[in-house]
Image: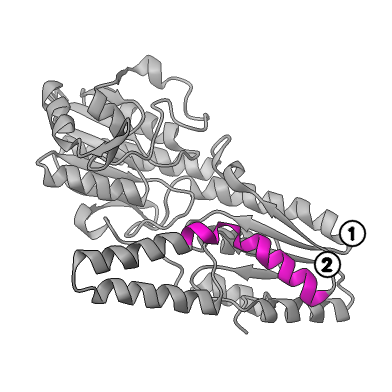
Amino acid sequence: MASDQCIGVLTSGGDCPGLNAAIRGLGKAALDRYDMSMIGFRDGFRGLVQDRTLRITGEKLSGILTDGGTILGTSRDKPHKMPLGDRTEDMTPAIVETYHRHGLEAVVCIGGGGTQKNAMRLMEAGLNVVTLPKTIDNDIAKTDVSFGFDTALQIATEAIDRLHSTATSHHRVIVVELMGHRAGWLALGAGIAGGADAILIPEIPYSADIVADAIKRRAKRGHRFSIVAVAEGAVTVEQQQQIDDLVQQKKDAQDKDEKKVASDALKKFHEEHVDHTLRLTGQLEQSTGMESRLTILGHLQRGGTPSAADRLLATRLGSACAEVLAKRQYAVMVAARGDATEIVPLPEVAGQKKLVPPDHPWIQAARLVGTCMGDE
């Protein structure tokens, strides 16, 4: 099938396993099946601004399916707020110029929630865009799952498995912090799969006293250790009330100054919340009288070889994206829907989050096997 389409592609936001598999799936289908040409832009949207490119060829795609990370590099730079030395500027006009200089038909933006919003800004600037959903957090709206999640889930579960032996040997409480931003999918899934005794996620505000009571009940039954899986965005009941109040203040703001005050207060809260699992660990030790230790998995969850499921998903989404481009369907995200794919209008995705519903089957399963969720 002959084509005169030249497609740009970039990876943006945090790295994760499956990015290279998605680039490969998109590239091989676009080059071989649809006879397109393809240009990669290095380090996310900054590459579009600075016109730093990598010509995507069959040779470049060879052997990258199993590699973690991204051959294009990535960054968290935003087109409309890009740091340039000691200042921040809207570099959207430079991106538009690069786009037209290369005669691009469209640009494919592979990334998480922030990337979806930034892609929509480019759409609003008149560019043809298509996105793919990538994140270990699994919090992108309108897709069943995002690639990167399965591998991170496997890594986190293995870590909890390993922590069981030391917790048992030393009769300790082990608190393990997992990523997930402000969604609980990763902590919930890994906590269930790893047999955690308590799982704390952002969607269910917790009480440290309730967690401590659950640990003490286990100790009375002869289980002198506990594993507590905590999402990085988990909050107490009191902290959730604080957030709700600040969000309401932001909504009720009468002018920009009032809105900025509320926004800054929210930002400060989240910045100061980064050590919440350390504080929780101390609280649990004091309340239970059991030695408690904290493990933060951090970026370990984002690295390494992608799982078979993530390779399959990324290849499915990437190759389906090439088909969407061939049909000249733009301003959409290619979503996973069952074993198939589906295109979703980008405005329905950008700015939205897929959080864990309180009645989700995973939560029900966790409660039925006796896992403490911090609320009862």
Q: Which label was assigned to residue 91?
A: none
- First in sequence, mark 2 or 1: give its number: 1
Q: Magenta-highlighted stretch: main secondary structure?
A: helix
Do labels 2 and 1 touch, CB within 8 Å?
Answer: yes
Q: In this rendering, does residue 356 appear at all?
A: yes
Residue beneath disc 2? 225
Q: Give how far across and how far down residue 49 sits, in percent.
A: 23, 29
Q: Give how far across and how far down residue 308 sits, in percent.
A: 54, 41
Element under label 2? Answer: loop
Q: Residue furthest top?
A: 59
Q: Is residue 277 left or right of residue 67?
A: right
Residue beneath disc 1? 170
Instruction: Check residue 271 for magenta coloring.
Output: yes
Element under label 1? Answer: helix
Which stretch appears magenta?
Answer: 270-288
At horizontal 46% and vertical 68% (from top left) the residue drawn is 356
On-image quarter of the C terminus: bottom right
Could you say which quadrant of the image residue 303 lies in?
A: top right
Q: Is residue 158 left or right of residue 165?
A: left
At horizontal 29% and vertical 34% (from top left) the residue drawn is 45
